[in-house]
């Protein structure tokens, strides 16, 4: 028996025929709990009830499967590296709490063996207390057989920051949710996302920045490259709730489309019930500029290679925002490995 | 004349239905330095872009051989691999691609594969000549570079790629005196280290002061109207292009 | 700046709100059933195919669901809408023959004056039927056909009408297309022959006077190869405390090398449900231009859509929506790039004020094979206070590598320093804010003929009146 779960709903919805209003995933009737070293059950699961990007049905499914939240042991001043190498179905809810004035650096590396067929759900919940900083970097690069859902929820207090860097590469079908509740004055949430989708891979995203508090600020920057029947849907919502005067939200997307077989959908919502705010969205979608290719070819680099270089460049645009030097080096090494593969 | 490597014969080129080059002839021998001068709109940059194979430049008649092979049949990257190089008048910004990655890939494409360590060492050495901070290697290609920095980065590529014929398209334009001197040093280093040929497209002459020049060609209205040795440069400096335009 | 002040003071809504006494020849009872459809068909002396078409549409209407994604339309109960009201006059070609009170209404709205000053032809619809229609001789002599829809259905062009009627806006598309197909009445048919360039605009004006009634005019415009036309549509109604419904359909066929500009200033009263459909299909090398101002209605669903079918076809959309108190205006546009080297340029502005809700909904689709497609979309919203709501919901669906797609959206408020600057030059705060909002709408007013731009600016100032504390 499989459960059919609705995730990544667009609120409010738009024309049905565009098929961007929501996504359905098939999941086994229940999922075994994944394990991460150095975690312990949270004292009170109720305290970690939080909206996420994938939405209520996924959280309800996790609760039904008995996947209760666990708190990860992340300490200020050191890099917390969490490697998740999926070998079988596993679901997990990982909680991180940055106390007042603290800084957490977290790096997650999501992989799976090429020949493993499995489903993985990873939900990450973050509470950033006053004046804290959470730097979360996720490298999501599973093998072909892993159906993966990556879901994030955050609550950000006064003057706190959550900086997310995500790299999506490989896998087959990846669903990604993200929601930040900017509840604190002068709070900040940033998402820098680099993605490569090729060879029939899909990526379905729902990212929501909910501005409750005055002068809260959010940014979403996506750079990516699509080729060979890849599909990407990006829903990005900046929601200015009444009372968030002085808030500022920006979304930017730049997607290279490398051939005629891809589907690239972009749905950048700006919702607003407050007068004194600044919201903006910008997108540029299309093939690489000819003069750029000519420049590279004039240096002897053939067209295919030039496109590969540009593809990787779209990841590096996100990587360059990793704050922690250790995390930066780790991710650069992963990208360099792929460079040597060419 | 030493062995001829580039031969342009009766070249006609159109850009967006407008004929720019109207029967241009040019021969460059191995190790020679040629200068192309001429007023704005004469077709100087068109010549460079046509030789490098930019798609908007349509060759309607004439021929170009490079080491005896038909250059016009080759794709741009193939031309580069045969040893042709052009320093761009307006180098393109490529976000996300580091200068080091770009040059390393270029060198590799030309058959010079280096370990990262050797590459960095070689690059640092050449950057000294150009008075460039090695930190530039980690910056995104031309993104946020000043005009002078962009041109230095072009010359760095010239020194690293060691082509057989380098076209410098207005490499000195828009630069201050110091920057021109530095770029000129770099070009001189290319002459000395590589001994390759040069085709320097310019409408000023400052960049030429420190270089050996074998031949000067004056282009006006799409063809060569005067040729001579480097004294022609001095003559143009004194009296300008007027006398060639009337002709 | 006292001059500005006078202008602001001078405007009032009353010209739109005058209610004529209902002196109808026919008013069908409220509701929707087969019997009512048959009677509309009889009243209009439909050809057989049209009667069958209507009945079939009623079936489709009953099967389809109300859209779930837009503003609520619970306040609209079809059982309380009269779908057909014939005024007590036949269509006239001279204003002198139009009944006095109806004529006065159109005089107040400035239609006969505009006709004399700047139009090549005018159709004026009052409730379900046209009461006036006239075309300049010179234009008629060029072979341009501009008639009421009923005449078109029976006259020389009946085959052409039948061939195109509800072929772009098919009844199965959504519930209100089906409703329209069942009860449509009035509207215009325009045919511009090959190579004919109509140098001054044609206009249709729609006035809904009857309380609790619906207006369902159908506009069909065919611009033949190499021809050129500017068509203007205006609409208004007095305010009632019950729901009125407008569900018109506009179908536009722009042939090879032709150009069509379609301008609308919509100013329905604030009890109106405006569920309107407009679609254009654009052939090779042809151009479609939309200019759209939405000011009135209680609830609007309005998204003119364009299919860029032919190679090198182009589209430009310029629109403004102003949602004030009690209004929920869901407006925008759709474009589908199909041919090669097509281009679309979209510029929308939206203003929300006094609790109004404005939603800008757009969709840009680039189909596989639509090589060389270019699209630039810019959506700007202005929040005038913090009790209103302004949402932007764009979708881009790109399926070709050879496309150049740009999208920009922004939301902001009236900058305090700009208000301060104007006030330092002696303007009142209210005038300063009104002037800034008019400036925000400048992209649309620049696209309109002068009289219409002036009307639009008046509407904006009217809406901005009393916006301070």
Image (cartoon, coloured by chain):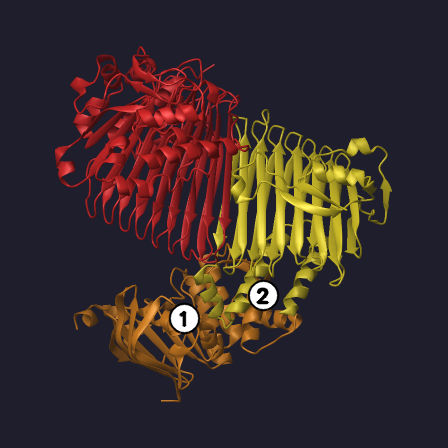
Chain colours: A yellow, B orange, C red
Residue sitting at the far top: C21
Q: Which residue is mark 2?
A: B101
Residue B178 in which image quadrant: bottom left
Residue C316 in which image quadrant: top left
Viewer can see residue C60: yes
Q: Is residue C137 above or below residue B237?
A: above
List x then y, in percent, for residue A196.
60, 57
Q: Is residue A259 above or below residue C166?
A: below
Residue C53 in which image quadrant: top left
List x then y, in percent, for residue C276.
40, 31
Tag shown at residue C446 = none
First in sequence: mark 2 vs mark 1: 2
The residue at the point 78 percent across, 47 percent down is A91
Q: Nearer the viewer, residue B28 or A148?
A: A148
Viewer can see residue C302: no
List x then y, in percent, for residue A285.
49, 52
Marks 2 and 1 on same chain:
yes
Q: Chain of mark 1?
A: B
- Left or right for A101, reference C91: right
Q: Which residue is mark 1?
A: B168
Q: Quadrant of the N terminus of chain C?
A: top left
Check disc 1 and report its element: helix, strand or loop. strand
- Left or right for B163, reference B226: right
Check disc 2 and report its element: helix, strand or loop. helix
């Amino acid at each position: 028996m499989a459960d059919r779960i609705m995730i990544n709903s667009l609120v409010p919805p738009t024309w049905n025929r565009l098929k961007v209003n929501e996504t359905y995933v098939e999941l086994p009737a229940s999922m075994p709990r994944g394990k991460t070293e150095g975690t312990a059950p949270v004292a009170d699961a109720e305290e970690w009830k939080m909206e996420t990007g994938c939405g209520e049905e996924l959280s309800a499914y996790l609760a039904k499967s008995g996947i209760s939240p666990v708190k990860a042991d992340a300490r200020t001043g050191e890099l917390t590296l969490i490697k998740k190498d999926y070998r079988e179905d596993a679901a997990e809810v990982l909680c991180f709490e940055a106390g007042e004035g603290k800084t957490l650096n977290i790096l997650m590396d999501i992989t799976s063996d090429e020949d493993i067929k499995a489903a993985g759900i990873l939900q990450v919940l973050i509470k950033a207390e006053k004046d804290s900083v959470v730097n979360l970097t996720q490298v999501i690069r599973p093998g072909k057989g892993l159906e993966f859902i990556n879901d994030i929820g955050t609550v950000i207090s006064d003057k706190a920051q959550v900086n997310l860097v995500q790299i999506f590469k490989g896998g087959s079908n990846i669903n990604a949710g993200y929601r930040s509740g900017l509840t604190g004055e002068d709070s900040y949430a940033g998402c820098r996302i680099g993605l490569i989708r090729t060879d029939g891979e899909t990526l379905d995203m729902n990212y929501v920045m909910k501005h409750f508090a005055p002068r809260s600020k959010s940014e979403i920057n996506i750079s990516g490259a699509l080729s060979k029947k890849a599909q990407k849907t990006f829903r990005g919502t900046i929601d200015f709730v009444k009372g968030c005067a002085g808030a500022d939200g920006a979304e930017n997307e730049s997607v290279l489309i490398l051939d005629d077989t891809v589907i690239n959908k972009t749905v950048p919502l700006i919702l607003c019930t407050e007068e004194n705010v600044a919201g903006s969205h910008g997108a540029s979608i299309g093939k690489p500029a000819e003069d750029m290719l000519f420049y590279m070819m004039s240096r002897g680099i053939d067209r295919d290679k030039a496109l590969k270089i540009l593809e990787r460049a779209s990841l590096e645009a996100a990587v360059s925002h990793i704050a922690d030097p250790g995390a930066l080096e780790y991710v650069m090494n992963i990208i360099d490995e792929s460079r040597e593969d060419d | 004349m030493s062995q001829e490597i580039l031969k342009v014969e009766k070249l006609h080129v159109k850009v967006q239905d407008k004929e720019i080059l109207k029967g241009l002839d040019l021969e460059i021998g191995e190790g020679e330095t040629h200068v192309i001068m001429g007023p704005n709109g004469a077709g100087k940059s068109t010549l460079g872009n046509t030789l490098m194979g930019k798609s908007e430049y349509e060759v309607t008649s004439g021929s170009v051989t490079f080491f005896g092979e038909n250059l016009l049949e080759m794709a741009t990257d193939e031309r580069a691999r045969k040893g042709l190089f052009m320093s761009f008048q307006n180098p393109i910004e490529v976000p996300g691609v580091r200068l080091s990655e770009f040059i390393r890939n270029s060198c590799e494409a030309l058959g010079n594969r280096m370990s990262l360590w050797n590459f960095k060492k070689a690059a640092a050495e050449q950057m000294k000549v150009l008075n460039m901070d090695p930190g530039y290697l980690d910056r995104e290609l031309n993104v946020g570079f000043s005009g002078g920095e962009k041109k230095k980065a072009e010359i760095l590529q010239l020194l690293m790629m060691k082509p057989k014929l380098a076209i410098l398209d207005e490499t000195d334009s828009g630069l201050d005196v110091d920057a021109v001197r530095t770029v000129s040093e770099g070009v001189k280093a290319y002459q000395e280290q590589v001994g390759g040929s040069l085709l320097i497209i310019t409408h000023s002459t400052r960049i030429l002061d420190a270089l050996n020049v074998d031949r000067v060609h004056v282009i006006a209205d799409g063809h060569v109207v005067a040729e001579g040795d480097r004294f022609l440069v001095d003559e143009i400096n004194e009296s300008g292009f007027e006398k060639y335009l009337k002709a | 700046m006292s001059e500005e002040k006078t202008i602001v003071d001078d405007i009032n809504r009353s010209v739109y709100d005058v209610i004529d006494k209902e002196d109808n020849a026919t008013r069908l009872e409220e509701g929707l059933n087969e019997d009512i459809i048959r009677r509309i068909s009889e009243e209009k002396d439909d050809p057989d195919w049209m009667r069958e078409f209507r009945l079939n549409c009623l079936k489709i209407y009953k099967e389809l669901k109300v859209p779930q994604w837009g503003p609520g339309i619970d306040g609209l109960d079809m059982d309380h809408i009269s779908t057909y009201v014939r005024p007590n006059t036949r269509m006239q070609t001279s204003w002198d023959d139009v009944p006095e009170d109806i004529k006065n209404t159109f005089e107040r709205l400035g239609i006969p004056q505009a006709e004399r000053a700047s139009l090549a032809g005018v159709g004026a619809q009052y409730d379900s039927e046209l009461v006036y229609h006239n075309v300049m001789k010179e234009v008629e002599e060029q072979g341009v056909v501009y008639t009421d829809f009923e005449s078109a259905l029976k006259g020389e062009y009946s085959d052409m009408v039948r061939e195109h009627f509800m072929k772009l806006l098919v009844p199965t598309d959504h519930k209100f297309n089906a409703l329209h197909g069942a009860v449509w009445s009035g509207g215009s048919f325009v045919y511009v022959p090959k190579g004919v360039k109509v140098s001054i605009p044609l206009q249709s004006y729609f006035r809904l006077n009857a309380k609790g009634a619906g207006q369902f005019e159908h506009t069909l415009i065919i611009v033949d190869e190499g021809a050129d036309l500017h068509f203007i549509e205006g609409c208004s109604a007095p305010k009632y405390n019950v729901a009125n419904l407008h569900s018109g359909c506009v179908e536009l066929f722009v042939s090879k090398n032709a150009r069509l500009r379609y301008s609308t200033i919509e100013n329905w009263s604030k009890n109106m449900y405006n569920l309107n459909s407009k679609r254009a299909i654009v052939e090779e090398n042809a151009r479609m231009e939309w200019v759209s101002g939405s000011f009135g209605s209680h609830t609007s669903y309005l998204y003119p859509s364009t299919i860029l079918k032919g190679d090198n076809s182009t589209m430009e959309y310029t629109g403004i929506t102003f949602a004030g108190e009690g209004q929920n205006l869901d407006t925008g546009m759709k474009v589908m790039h199909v041919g090669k080297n097509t281009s679309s340029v979209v510029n929308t502005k939206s203003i929300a004020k006094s609790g109004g809700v404005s939603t800008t909904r757009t969709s840009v689709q680039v189909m596989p094979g639509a090589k060389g497609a270019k699209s630039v979309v810019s959506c700007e919203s202005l929040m005038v206070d913090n009790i209103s709501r302004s949402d932007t919901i764009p979708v881009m669906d790109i399926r070709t590598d050879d496309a150049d797609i740009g999208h920009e959206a922004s939301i902001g408020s009236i900058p305090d320093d700009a208000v301060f600057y104007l006030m330092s030059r002696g303007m009142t705060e209210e005038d300063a804010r009104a002037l800034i909002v008019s400036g925000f709408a400048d992209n649309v007013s620049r696209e309109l003929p002068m009289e219409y731009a002036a009307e639009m600016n008046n509407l904006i100032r009217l809406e901005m009146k009393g916006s301070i504390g």
